[in-house]
Image (cartoon, rainbow, N blue to C red):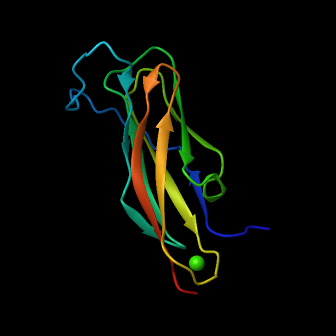
Amino acid sequence: MRKGIVATVTALALTMVMSGVFLAGCGGSGGAVPLELYIPTSCPEGESVDCAISIPYPVALPVVVSITASAPSNLLAAAVIIPAGEVYVKFTLEVIDDLVPGADILLTITASAPGYAVDTAPFTIIDAGS
Ligand SMILES: [Ca+2]
């Protein structure tokens, strides 16, 4: 029943701690703690890409990060969880081939979590031409 291009976020299994690594721009400015979304700039239909989300320092509770797309029909509801005490989680963004030729689609992917500043990244779905 899928229509158009669908991207799904899957595979939450792999986690790692970026010990001692602090990201640029995290200096306290009084604002919310920033999320950092790491995502390739594009992915062809039918393929998947490795992505990650991080926070600047570990916290005592898991951080549930919602992943959304600027065209909601292109991204199934997805959330990734940064485990308690960790600052980093990897996930996979899978772009499903709709088997219909069409133009490439530029999306904005947004990561958000309560108490954190959102992060966004551009992401182009490259049409497979089939
Ligand atoms: Ca297509």
Q: Closest to the observer: 59 or 17?
A: 59
Image position of 65 (left or right of 34): right
Ligand 1 visible in quadrant:
bottom right
Residue 101 position by quadrant: bottom right
12 and 26: which one is in front?
A: 26
Q: Is residue 105 above or below residue 15?
A: below
Give the vertical position of 126 relative to 112 (above or below): below
Whole-percent x and y of residue 74?
A: 61, 59
Residue 48 position in % (x across, y down): 48, 64
Q: Residue at position x 44%, y 32% from top?
A: 118
Residue at 48 percent of width and 39 percent of height: 111
- Farthest right residue in view: 1
Q: Exactly how many numbered labels are in the figure? A: 0
Percent across and percent down for residue 6 are 62, 63
- Quarter holding the C terminus is bottom right
Which residue is at the front of the view, 54 or 66?
Answer: 66
Place of residue 60 in the rendered image (x, y in percent of width and height, measured from the top left): 46, 14
Q: Quadrant location of residue 49?
A: bottom left
User: Which residue sits furthest bottom?
Assistant: 130
Q: Could you tell me which quadrant the N terminus lies in? A: bottom right
Q: Residue at x 34, y 17 (%)?
A: 31
- For image coordinates 41% across by 43% down, the residue present is 120
- Please determine whether, in this image, residue 33 is positioned above or below residue 121: above
